Structures are given as structure tokens and as C-alpha cells.
Image (cartoon, rainbow, N blue to C red):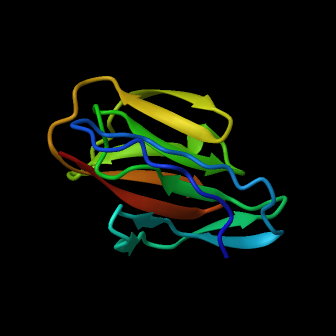
Amino acid sequence: MTIGRVIAKGNSETKLNYNYLDISPVIGNNYYRLKLVDKDGSFENSRIISVANNANSVSFEILGNPIVNRELKFLLKGEKQQNVQLYDISGRTVPFSMVNTGNIYTMKPANNLSSGLYILSLQNQGNLISKKVLVP
């Protein structure tokens, strides 16, 4: 079902960011996808993501991949930010600073990231959740 609509800002030479807040998520798993509609009526659907909405649930999703401006944004709910690490493809830890607004975190690596593949990981109750991150 449609839960909201955001009007496009039009053509641009730079990346434009949009957001929408689901103010009535159901208890349990919520599944989301975007439907991007062009002026001519053609459309494309994004991949589906699942967000667990339980008192003790953990959500960990990258917001934008490949990343922009060498900053990595991700959603983290139900877990401590100290349990998040960034690794290069060789498995070396990449030092970073992090700021957050609510459950949205912005990771700023201490040094410029070289182009390539990185791994963002979350240690959660003995489990390791890993996400691939592309730096163009």
C-alpha cells in the first residue's frame, strides 16, 4: 500500500536527497520500497528493505550506496554505535568519527577513503552483521 508521496525537485546536475517518515509503522517487520515515477509515467521500483519494529529489534541499513562525499550514512536502531566497525577489503580497521541524529548515523573516516569496497559491520549478541560499502 502507498504510505506517502514526495514530489521530485526536477532535473539536477547534483545528487538530490529525499526522505519520508512512516508515522504509523506496524509492530513487527515493515517492508518498504520506493516507486520512482518519471514525467512520462514510466516507473522503476527500488529493492525491498525490511525494518523490524519491535521493542528489542535491531535495524542496521546503509543509506545510500555507493556513498557520497566520503561519508557513510546508515540506520542503527536497538544497538550501540560502539559495536559498529569499518574495514577495508584487506580486513584492516578504518578509524572514523561518528555523529547521529536519532537513529541515523554519519560515519566520517579519519583519512580520505580510497575508491573501492569496504565492509561496515555490526557485532550483535555474538552475531556479526556485515554490509558491503562502495566508495566511487
Q: Give the quadrant of the C terminus.
A: top left
Q: Residue furthest front?
A: 40
Q: Give the quadrant of the N terminus.
A: bottom right
> Which residue shows up at 58% across the image and 40% down it?
104
> Which residue shows up at 39% across the image and 28% down it?
108
Closer to the camera, 48 or 10? 10
> Which residue shows up at 55% across the image and 51% down it?
6
Closer to the camera, 64 or 4? 4
> Which residue shows up at 57% across the image and 48% down it?
75
Residue 27 location (% of width, % of height): 83, 69
Residue 100, placed above or below residue 59 = above
Residue 30 location (% of width, % of height): 69, 70
Residue 35 relative to residue 53: left or right = left
Residue 36 relative to residue 7: left or right = left
Residue 114, placed above or below residue 27 = above
Residue 76 relative to residue 112: left or right = right
Q: How many marks?
A: 0
Closer to the camera, 57 or 21? 21
Residue 14, placed above or below residue 125 = above
Residue 49 location (% of width, % of height): 53, 69
Closer to the camera, 86 or 104? 104
Residue 53 location (% of width, % of height): 76, 63
Q: Quadrant of residue 126?
A: bottom right
Q: Residue furthest bottom?
A: 1
Residue 111, placed above or below residue 46 = above
Residue 134 relative to residue 48: left or right = left
